[in-house]
Amino acid sequence: MPSTKPEDQESKGFAIARYTDIVRRRHLQFLIPLLLGWLVVWGASWVLPARYKSGTLILVEQPTMPKNYVIPNINDDLQDRLQSITQQILSRTRLMLIIDRFKLYSGGRYELTPGERVDQMRKDIDIELVRDPHDAQISAFNIYYSASNPRIAQQVTGELTNLFINANLQVRQQESEDTTKFLESQLENARTSLSDQEAKVREFEGEHIGELPDQQASNLQILSGLQSQLTSEQDALNTAQQQHVYLETLINQYRALEETPRASANIPTRLPAIDEELNKLRAQLIDLKSRYTDQYPDVQKVKEEIATTEKMRDSLVAELGKKSEAGASSNGSESQDFSNPAQSATMLQLQGQLKENQAEIANREHTITSLKAQIDDYQLRLNQEPLRQQQLADLTRGYDQSKANYDDLLKKKNESQMATSMEKLQEGERFIMLDPPSLPVKPDFPNRLKFCGMGLGVGLALGLIVVGGLEFMDDRLHSEDEIAELLPVEVIADIPEILTPQDERRNKRRMLLGMVVAVLVFGIIAAGSAFSYLHS
């Protein structure tokens, strides 16, 4: 380990010796400013007017109703709401009411203006937030107020506490009611818009009945029925037209028989045609019976035609028998009239059936024309269905949006009404005063123990400044080293200080005086600190 240089040891010894010499020579100049500085600060602590601070703790109680059942409709940021409430309470109007009620800041040496009183009271109010260490949420807050009278400080703190509690309830209720009113106004606008959309949809559906997309199935069903009915009518028309041709043929044959007696000889030749027609009618009857009941009009008509044809065949067969019995006589009298009353009756019956057949054909044709018009109308409806579907989709899109908006606002409005009812019943977030405002028994300001410490520091600083200043202005030499530094050559020998008995006594008295002064100064400081502690 390297050895310490002699120069370093000499410098350190010189510094310690110099400081020791300064203490020996300047201890009184240090102790007196120390005592004076401490006395000034400590005395100020007893001269300054005492200020008493009263405080209370307000707990932020969460809503008793779970948020899953009732969703709050106000701002959940407690810090923002507290800031807003604080600004309301610390407003000029509110504070002036408290100042006038308790006669604060009056009776002093100088009369303060209302604005100065409000500013002073704001300085005397202190609000301290208490946060949960787990989630840093505000769980409580303290309200402090300082006054020269402890009772006044307690009363004002209680008044401020009540203002905070009541203001919180009022703010929450007002915000909740405003939210509900806003949702009600928006819901009314949404209801009006929804009504307009419904009116447009109803008007469109009224103007295009039968062309709407939801009527497509019924239109197809009706069109299919109309087409089936048209097919049946066309079949019936064809049958009626065939019957018409058949009846005209029979009537023409009967007329030929009535006009030409010889034509009666051709009667046997007509029997096969009548039998063939009768077979066709019977086959048609069988076919109709396989599809329809006996009461169906076409079945009844075919039965009547069969009966008429059979009657006509029986008449021809009877006439043929009569002619064969009177064959000879008929050959001798050619000019004889062969008109037969039975044949005339048959002719009249055939003519009646022909008229009925003509009327049926006209009705069938009219029905077919009507059915074709209806079919065209329904086909047009089906052709218009894509266009109507697009138009209706445009209308219903706006309607669906308005309906969704209305339903959403209605749900929110109902939830907001429940939240407002909860706030009115004071079941929401509340401020609860855990501890009543305290009655201070000791002043919060000035803190005399702190003033003692501050005074000690001021005294030390003042003493050091005085000693330093005196040393700086002192141009005398107090040691051999200082003399050696001034000489240009090295000192060969020095003469030590020769003290006389009188000088030694004087030095002892000075040392004793310094010790007495030091004990006195520190004793005074200790006594003052103890007194301050006992009376603080």
Image (spheres, helix red, strand yellow):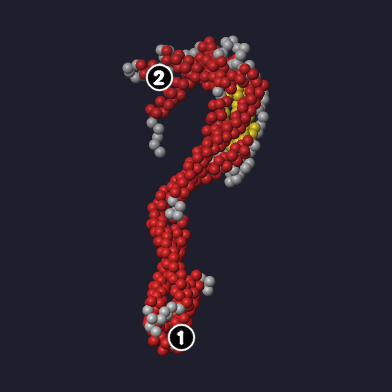
Query: Is residue 382 visible in this depiction of the protein?
Result: no
Q: Residue at x 54, y 26 (%)?
A: 87
Residue 337: percent from left, percent from top: 41, 79
Compute the Cα span from label 1 to label 2. Answer: 193 Å
Decide: few, some or many residues near mark 1? Use Cα within 10 Å; few <14, some 14-19, many ≥20: few
Name which residue type carries label 1: Lys
Report which residue position mark 2 lands on.
481
Decide: few, some or many residues near mark 2? Use Cα within 10 Å; few <14, some 14-19, many ≥20: few
Residue 334: percent from left, percent from top: 38, 83
Along the line of sight, the residue nearer the viewer: 425 or 103? 425
Report which residue position mark 1 lands on.
322
Q: Is label 1 in a helix, a strand or a loop?
A: helix
Q: Earlier in the sequence, mark 1 or mark 2?
A: 1
Name which residue type carries label 2: Asp
Q: Quadrant of residue 519?
A: top right
Q: Residue at x 43, y 23 (%)?
A: 14
Q: Residue at x 40, y 78 (%)?
A: 257
Residue 445: percent from left, percent from top: 59, 21
Q: Residue furthest left?
A: 488
Along the line of sight, the residue nearer the viewer: 443 or 14? 443
